[in-house]
Amino acid sequence: MSDENKVDITGIDKASIEMIQKAADEGVELVFDRAKKIKPCPIGAVGQCCKNCMMGPCRLAGKDAEEKHGVCGATLGVIAARNLARMIASGTACHGDHGRDIAFTLLAAAKGEAPGYEIKDEKKLHEVAGWLEIPTEGKEKNELGIEVANACISMFSSQTGELPFIKRAPKKRQELWRERGVIPRGIDREVVEMMNRTHIGMDQDVENIMLQGFRCALANGWGGSMVATELQDVLFGTPKPIRGKVNLGVLKEDYVNIVLHGHEPTLSEMIAAMSQDPEIIAYAKSKGAEGINLSGICCTANEVLMRHGIPTAGNFLQQELAILTGAVEAMVVDVQCIMSYIVDVSKNYHTKIITTSRKAKITGADYVEFDEHNAVESAKGIIREAIDNFANRGKVQIPDIDTHDMVVGFTDETIAYMLGGTYRGSYRPLNDAIISGRIRGIVGIVGCNNPKVATDDVHTLLAKELIKNDVLVVVSGCSGSTIAKSGLLVPEAKDMAGPGLREICETVGIPPVLHVGSCVDNTRILIACTHMVKEGGLGDDISDLPVVGVAPGWMSEKAISIGHFTVASGLLTIFGVSFPVTGSKEMSDMVFNKYAEMFGGKFAFEPDPLKMAELCLDHIDEKRKALGIDTKTERVLYDMEKRRDLQF
Ligand code: NFS
């Protein structure tokens, strides 16, 4: 292979490099090869191409791009805005449909029509009912579950009014949203209206298009994603800190390896439960295996990791690499972020790709429909198919390097509980740690991996630089499983943190990087921010907090939707890789400046991880100054009375 075509392995973990080398030796193409071969279209990458009607596609490139018009007359700004807005709509649709599916599963479970599922967290059910203004008194859990499920389902179809979770945000933020006219009326409605308004001949005002973009993104963050997170907790239990392992080395040679890949825990939870079934284990043993070994990829990995400690085989970019080990009997997928090429890779080995959702079939893959009404049998059928495939194994090569421990499961509830004391959780200690300067600020490192940039370096260098500067880092999605691979998600990583953060980590016993879950769980960050505002001492809106969101290796439309709801919620949000509007001055000004005037939050674009860290620290310091907490206050030794105050 010529050097030009060699995959750039800078920053990638050793286990992945071993598999990339194996692929090269065996002539198997990978995502990294395709990313090298397919040069991204320079016009589309910066938002200069409109293909919304067939008078075009119109490409408004070149030095005079700003003066050009599409055939319909659309300006470059309008074209870039429409493209971005459609990305938001698609991302909101993805997370929204996920939330809807979970709501229907809750409904079926509560009605007794989905054997194997039951409401596991009644406390959460009552809390959610409260936000939905559903009276709870005297109601049995399934009765309440039906009402909560129906109320959530109606968030998708509602046409007027405000989504009920909006009132969870700080009052000032809600008022701002009302003033700007961006409060979502119904999740589906905002997606449909976004698609309508970006059709040829519709909305042709950049600001007006993006205001609907924000309404659509808020329908994700304070709508669809929040429904998914909350109802998953209700059904499967709210995660608590738990240990797990990450990287390809979690696959086991003598076991039937089933890799769970995708997003909705409805499927993976049932496979996790059924893999413990004595009859199923006996069946695996009858085929010569020691047992069944489950592991995860992408957000499904995060869901089963934080609830059961099931190890993570890898992030988005490792899905093909897991198959290359030759040790995977079945990769079971449901929806989202599944590369169709895993089917091609699997043809070189014995791995079966089993698709399970009517919404996401892949030509050439097996299809075993997963029906939550018949989940036990569906899950058993899938596991049996994997077991039957054990006999077809060829040579196995599982990298036994770079597997790391991690502690995960830090929800907005557990953060309060751990920092706030045993009896009653509170955000007071966290706020006090920020005010005293021991914790300088908080940065959420979220989102995907992208083969266009040096994965995993871009994530880990950023995280290391931040914790060194006393910034508490929270992670989710594939960023979480990526950063975990550098060993930062264990309490012992405190030694890499600055003195203030190290002290907090030592006292509480937490890692300096807290894993909050999957991408829909970014809503946990929104709620944590809201708690910090409500606790007092850090301003009266999310935009006052020394908090930043970063997506260093983003690639999906979901990430763009998430970015817009974090900006609308008041946070500086930094994107790496590239930003799909930079070809238009008008849209660049909108995204990088005017958003701030509209919402107090804005985007920044910076591909270099150390410069990203600098941007985070500058923003945090600016916010600290505005709050009047920019000087480190004297350290106070607490007496017993003060300690008690802290806890209650
Ligand atoms: Ni998020 Fe999850 Fe990963 Fe990116 Fe895809 S798995 S929803 S989109 S690639 S973080």
Image: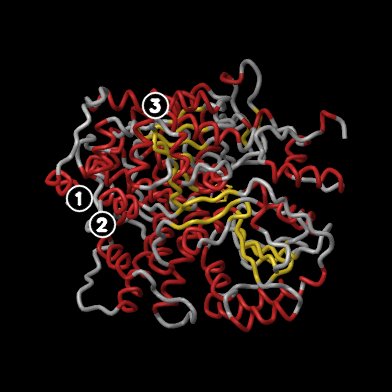
Residue at the left extreme of this rendering: 641
The disc labelled 1 sits on which kind of residue?
A: Gln
Query: Going 42% across and 56% down the picture, which residue do you hit?
Result: 241
Disc 3 CB within 8 Å of nearest ligand 1 atom: no
Disc 2 CB within 8 Å of nearest ligand 1 atom: no
In front here: 201 or 28? 28
Of the numbered discs 2 and 3, the one sitting upstream in the chain is 2
User: How far apart in space, not on screen, are marks 2 and 3 (Cα)?
Assistant: 44 Å
Q: Which class describes the residues within 10 Å of circle 2: few (<14), some (14-19), or many (20+)?
A: few
Query: Going 43% across and 64% down the picture, which residue do you hit?
Result: 232
Q: Is residue 75 visible?
A: no
Q: Secondary structure at mark 2?
A: loop
User: In this picture, is 215 found above or below 333?
Assistant: above
Q: Secondary structure at mark 1?
A: helix
User: How far apart in space, not on screen, are marks 1 and 3 (Cα)?
Assistant: 41 Å
Q: Which class describes the residues within 10 Å of circle 3: few (<14), some (14-19), or many (20+)?
A: some
Query: Going 46% across and 48% down the picture, which residue do you hit?
Result: 515
Q: Which residue is mark 3?
A: 594
Q: Which residue is mark 1?
A: 647
User: In this picture, is 621 found above or below 24?
Assistant: above
In front here: 221 or 537? 537
* Dot label at residue 422: 2
The disc labelled 3 sits on which kind of residue?
A: Lys
The disc labelled 2 sits on which kind of residue?
A: Thr
Q: Secondary structure at mark 3?
A: helix
Closer to viewer: mark 2 or mark 3: 2
Q: Is residue 209 left or right of residue 180?
A: right
In front here: 83 or 388? 388
